[in-house]
Image: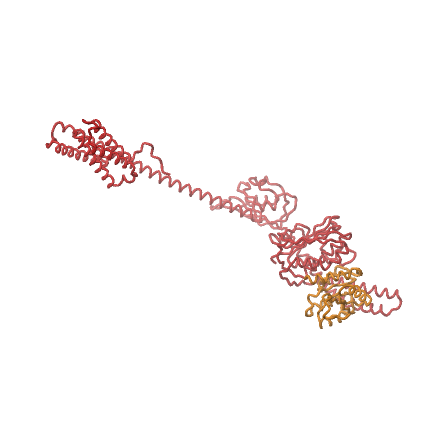
Amino acid sequence: MEPSLGPMKMDRRSLLFILRLLSVVTLGIMQVSGPGGWQETPPLYRWIMLAYAVWVLLGWALKPKYYRKTTILVTLFLVDTVLALVLLQGLSSLYGELFLIYFVTIFVAVLAQSVSGGVAAAVLSILLYAFLQYLRTGQYFIFDADHLIRYPFILVTGVLCGFLAEEGQRDDGEKKRLRDTTNMLADKVDLATRKLIESNHSLKAMLDYHKRILSCIQTGIVVAHQDGIIKTFNDGAVRITGYLEEAVDNKNLLELPERLGPLTKALQKTLSEGKGYNLENLEITTARGEVLPVSLQTSVMRSEEGKVLGAIATLKDISLLRQMEIQLTRSERLSALGEMAAGVAHEIKNPLNAIQGFSMRLSSKVQDPSLKKYADTIVQEVQRLDTIINDVLEYSRTTKLSKKPEDFQKLVDEVVQFAEEKFEKAGIRIVREFDPNLPLVPMDYNKIKQVILNLALNAVHAMSGGGTLTFKLSVAEALGDAETPGSKDWVAHVFLNQKVAVLAITDTGCGIAPENMSKLFHPFFTTKTTGTGLGLSICNKLIESHGGTISVQSVVGTGTTFSVQLPLDA
Amino acid sequence: MGNSSEDPRPLVMIVDDEPDLLRLIEICLKAQPIQVEAFHEGKVLLERLARAPNPQLIILDVMMPVLSGYEVCRALRALPGCDSIPVVFLTAKTQARDYVLGLESGGNYYIEKPFDVEKIGQKVLGFLAAGKGE
């Protein structure tokens, strides 16, 4: 940021160089135009002349900073003076001495850089001139009229050169001061600019930071200014209401869609009455047309002086909470039912044992084949009842898990191997798609094996004409986007951002009718002619006790996929 | 029916309460390079295993008096040296629940009756080979 001081700036080196060059040139002209001319000049003086010229040129080669050193300047002056003196002596000219005197005057005055210095230089020069004249003639001409006339000129030259040098120096000083001031100002402007940029960056970062906070909060936040204009409608609000920020931002509360009525009214009331509200169990209709249970809190935004600046509303989607409440109620009911069933089952098992034992005894005693057949039928039916009771007991039993990290691939292989014969007989081709990077999965090995076998056997049942059964093992972010037992979405919320191991068992069977999808995991629901209808309920219970889920997707006539998700960090 | 320790053929033990069926399976297996020991009930098998747990495969019927095939399987898994012997259930029980019980009790294979007489020998050889592979 060094400001330019213009093309006319002449530093001390240049000034001195010009003066010294003029001196060399003048002495040269004097030699050439002297009585004998250049030819008559003795060779020694020619060489001295040449040396003087080289000396002056060498002076030019010196860097400007050396011209600030007194020793350098004095050396230059002394050497110049001696050389010029010798040359003038050689030229034997009165005018030559006069030239020397002027040279000395100018030189010293410029060096002194002041009027007083110029006067001193002039006096010194006059004395030198008188001395030279004395040396030449042996007489003093100081008061000679011929010479007296020259003294004022020498004096004027000295004063003028001193004055000009002083002015030049002052000018330089001014320029330097100006330059320093300019530099200082430039530094200050630089600093201020840097601070401004930094402050701008900080502001932007802070703004971005607050925007990000607003954007990441799951809760919907809506801010209306005192004039009713919506100034903030965060991503949470967009997610909950389904309305885009652009459709709401900078709109007046009165212009908001009618579906957002409860929100609009709460904000208006808060603005007009200057107090917040806490409204639970409201319902809003989203842009998608869904009726969503929400809770809404409003608060007043005030200035330091207490003036109402606006109103803030926080909106929470409580559908998950509602679903969980329903789920809990259902679980409690089922649990009570299970306990009752278990009690009844235990009571029934004893008389059943007696019936089975006596029937077997009867079967071995009676000779009549038809009576024996009846007795055998009783035994078979009792065995069937026993199976049902065992299933009920299994379903209602509190599941105690012995979880440890297990190899899920090995488990699937063992299940496939166990039922291999059945797959083969049913004309089912087995496909395995295993993610090689699947880590060990925390589970109760035998319980999960039981679940997978159940699902695989269900698939066999669905593929009466044969087909393909695919076992696909992978790692995924939990997403419960398919039909899940109980409710549709709440499992997805529970698992949000959690890594899970997913086993998808896909058959190419007949598929499941849409009306049966929601009942699949209900106890005693079955589409088979045999079985208790507790298989999938037990599977679901076992997977839930692992903190996992079973979901199902099915297309009638194409096939079904049961997906078992088990959390990896359980 | 004896077992020689020098005999290089693998030893398979079968348990079924139906003598005719037991005989049939024995014949099918003996047609292969397999030594066979047959038992009419699970209790006898368990006593035999307690003395020398040396078979390479055990085939169990499920519906048997005294001890069911599942119970025998659970009991033999508790015997020293028997926890890794492959067990095949050969049974007329075909419900999913039966499969689950078989798997739960520690079985490795499940074959439904009636079985293919022509293929059972080869199948058992396959199980033996898979067991060796493990």
From the viewer's perspective, is residue B132 above or below residue A490? below
Q: Could you tell me residue A350's position as x and y percent?
A: 77, 68
**Left or right: A187 as drawn, with respect to A139:** right
**Left or right: A144 as drawn, with respect to B1:** left
Q: Could you tell me residue A398's position as x and y percent?
A: 68, 63
Viewer-side residue, A387 vs A177: A177
**Left or right: A229 as drawn, with respect to A103:** right
Chain represented in orange: B
Q: Could you tell me residue A444's position as x and y percent?
A: 65, 61
From the viewer's perspective, is residue A127 above or below residue A464? above
Viewer-side residue, A224 vs B94: B94
Q: Residue furthest left?
A: A139
**On the rendered image, what quadrant is the N terminus of chain A found in?**
top left
Instruction: Chain A: give its colour.
Output: red
How many numbered circles does the render carry? 0
**On the rendered image, what quadrant is the C terminus of chain A found in?**
bottom right
Residue A370 seen from this side = yes
Q: How is the image coloured?
A: by chain
- Residue B62 sits in quarter: bottom right
- Residue A338 sits in quarter: bottom right
Q: Could you tell me residue A296's position as x and y percent?
A: 59, 48
Residue A142 seen from this side = no
